[in-house]
Amino acid sequence: QLQLQESGPGVVKPSETLSLTCAVSGDSMTSRQYYWAWIRQPPGKGLEWLGTVAYSWTSYYNPSLESRLTISLDTSKRQFSLRLSSATAADTAVYYCARHNIQINAYDFWGQGTVVSVSS
Amino acid sequence: DIQMTQSPTSLSASVGDTVTITCRASQTISGFLNWYQQKPGKAPSLLIYTASKLQSGVPSRFSGSGSGTEFTLTISSLQPEDFAVYWCQHTYTNPYSFGPGTKLEIK
């Protein structure tokens, strides 16, 4: 059974870079069947798709964040990462990593989420 | 970007009821529409993919239908564990946006 686990600082200062990692266990990361994604949820609000990285290391980003966002894959460490530069209070959210199963074109496994607060 | 809307925003129902949630896309998304359930403090979990296919392990009282721009999620014979927030999401083209959610509460 696949397991995803987010990790990273719980507090980031404004203007700094928000960095998170998602550890993947229990299934292959290199299958062409899977992409790896980040989704966030501000407190009390809806879900926002941030972006995804494919097995080919090609990344796809939400255009609203593309200038600040980098998602990368490290299959040797069985993890993928998110970096969001120039953080502001609007980036305060629960950040989820998830697997995009291309065969069903849906997010079939999610991490438990990690809370990140942007505050001085 | 494709905009997703859901109705109703919230819904009160009783155990045993049947409820329907509607999701609309601002342009056609073919059948690339997924439904997720989220309970308080938990990550969303996949219920239905490509509009009508039931994810493995999801009870058959959940069903989905629709194509193009209008989709529905139906929950038959509501159980206590079904009271949660439901989200639709399209996976047609970047960005893969979600609807604003529907909160299903116990009456």
Image (tube, coloured by chain):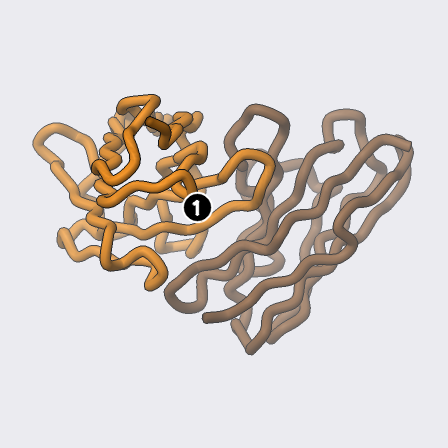
Chain colours: A orange, B brown
Image spot of residue B47 (x, y percent): 59, 43
Image spot of residue A42 (x, y percent): 50, 39
* Image quadrant assignment for residue B86: top right
Image spot of residue B19 (x, y percent): 83, 47
Q: Is residue A4 left or right of residue B67?
A: left
B94 w.r.t. B60: above or below: below
The quarter in which the C terminus of chain A is drawn is: top left
A21 w.r.t. B10: above or below: above
Residue at horizontal 32%, vertical 56%? A65
Q: Is residue B102 left or right of residue A79?
A: right
The residue type indicated by label 1 comes to Tyr
Q: Residue furthest left?
A: A76
A74 w.r.t. A65: above or below: above
Residue at horizontal 44%, vertical 67%? B92
Residue at horizontal 28%, vertical 30%? A13
Residue at horizontal 79%, vertical 25%? B80
Image spot of residue B106 (x, y percent): 85, 31
In the picture of the structure, the residue carrying the numbered disc 1 is A107
Of A14 and B21, which appears nearest the observer? A14
